[in-house]
Image (spheres, rainbow, N blue to C red):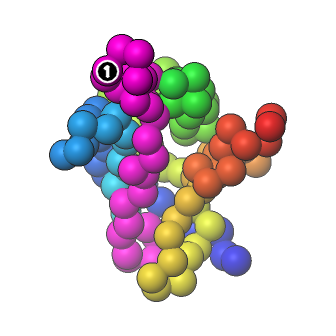
Amino acid sequence: METLNARIVGSKLGFNEHGIFDFCLVLEIQNGGGVSLGGYAMDQYNEELKKRVGTEYGMNLIMRILEVVGVNTWEELCGKYIRIKDAKIGDRVTAIGNLMKDEWVDFDTFGKEEE
């Protein structure tokens, strides 16, 4: 699997159309393509409170994304360069990496390593 450079050209952190708290990163890839990734629920429904509440997973994922990209705030993400593992057409991009260091976050496995 080839590693490609990408630039974050857009981001969203907030509630989606279903009321679920999630994020989205929009990437411009060095090969001329583009992709958006995210959509991972960072909250869950609490039966006792009868509403959605943030999760430890969600907070840790936000913090890890900021660490890997090398920024302090979500607002600083746009314009930053990262790496992705090239996915073939139709495949999902599930991991981003720091441009200079071998630091990655894989959204599909994040939080499961400690289980």
The picture places residue 76, in percent across and down from the top left corner, at 38, 30
Furthest toward the top, the residue is 49
**34, above or below 69, in the image:** below
**77, above or below 95, in the image:** above
Confirm whether residue 66 shows in the render. no
**86, above or below 56, in the image:** below
Residue that mark 1 sits on: 50
- Answer with left or right where residue 30 lies relative to residue 60: left
The residue sitting at 50% across, 70% down in the picture is 92
The residue sitting at 47% across, 60% down in the picture is 6
Confirm whether residue 115 shows in the render. yes
**Foreground pick, 15 / 66:** 15
**Foreground pick, 95 / 84:** 95
Q: Amino acid at mark 1?
A: Lys
The picture places residue 5, in percent across and down from the top left corner, at 54, 62
**Foreground pick, 40 / 95:** 40
The picture places residue 50, in percent across and down from the top left corner, at 31, 21
- Answer with left or right where residue 112 lies relative to residue 78: right
**38 inside magenta stretch:** yes
- Answer with left or right where residue 112 lies relative to residue 76: right
**Dividing the image into 4 quarters, which one contains the C terminus?**
top right
The residue sitting at 80% across, 35% down in the picture is 114
Number of numbered discs: 1
Dot 1: element: loop
Tell me which segment is drawn in magenta: 29-54
The picture places residue 40, in percent across and down from the top left corner, at 45, 46
